[in-house]
């Protein structure tokens, strides 16, 4: 297929990247997943779709059949069966599966770090009490600090 030479050298693609490559909107790809059982992208723990090269090439073929050659969805399904593209590949590459798992973990870490950053920014923006309003007294370095308002004489 001609699309193979145009695809970036990656194992997996996000749905937006695939939509740009294929020339359709992401909701169309999600619809095609329901209609064409061979088009089954992997999903990360966060339910993000990750399309393998094979899925992208299949999506390009489906688009060509539906948009360029004028097939209906059932007709395109039949044509894919004739071409041998109707089978879902259940064998996943260990390297690819590892990349999906690592990507999911990185996305979870990223959202956690974003939440922490938001908390830190909120703390930084909070008004600080005046330094003369609070004093801290401690009898030993390991003791718990007791906060008492300072008294002016």
Image (cartoon, rainbow, N blue to C red):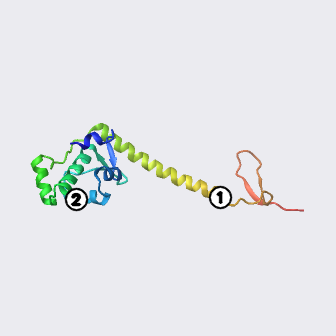
Q: Nearer the viewer, residue 146 or 33?
A: 33
**At which x and y percent is residue 18?**
31, 50
Q: How many other residues sit within 10 Å of disc 1, few (<14), some (14-19) or many (≥20)?
A: few
Residues 55 and 145: in front is: 55
Q: Please provide percent x and percent y for residue 149.
A: 78, 61
Q: Is residue 72 shown left or right of residue 110?
A: left
- Distance, label 2 to label 1, CA atoms, is 48 Å
Query: Is disc 2 placed on a helix, strand or loop?
Result: helix
| Residue name at image x 43 percent, y 50 percent | 108
Classify the position of the C terminus by image quarter. Answer: bottom right
Q: Residue placed at 60% from the left, 53% from the top?
A: 120
Could you tell me which quadrant the N terminus lies in?
top left
What's the residue at 12%, 47% (across, down)? 83
Q: Residue furthest right?
A: 153
Nearest to the observer: residue 122 or residue 26:
26
Residue 75 in the image: x percent, y percent? 12, 58
Verify CB contact (< 8 Å) between mark 2 and mark 1: no
Q: Which residue is mark 2?
A: 34
Residue 92 image-quadrant placement: top left
SS for tag 1? helix
Instruction: Single out the mark in the foreground, 2 or 1.
Output: 2
Residue 73 % position (x, y): 16, 60
Residue 21 numbered tag: none
Q: Which mark is residue 125?
A: 1
Q: Is residue 108 left or right of residue 137?
A: left
């Amino acid at each position: 297929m001609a699309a193979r030479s145009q695809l970036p050298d990656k194992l997996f693609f996000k749905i937006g990247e695939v939509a740009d490559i294929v020339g359709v909107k992401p909701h169309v790809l999600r619809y095609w997943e329901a209609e064409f059982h061979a088009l089954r992208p992997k999903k990360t723990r966060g339910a993000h779709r990750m399309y393998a090269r094979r899925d992208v090439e299949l999506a390009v073929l489906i688009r060509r059949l539906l948009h360029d050659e004028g097939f209906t969805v059932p007709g395109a399904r039949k044509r894919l069966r004739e071409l041998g593209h109707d089978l879902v590949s259940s064998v996943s590459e260990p390297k690819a599966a590892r990349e999906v798992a690592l990507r999911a973990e990185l996305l979870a870490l990223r959202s956690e770090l974003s939440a922490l950053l938001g908390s830190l920014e909120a703390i930084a923006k909070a008004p600080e009490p005046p330094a003369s309003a609070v004093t801290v007294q401690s009898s030993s370095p390991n003791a718990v600090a007791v906060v008492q308002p300072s008294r002016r004489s």
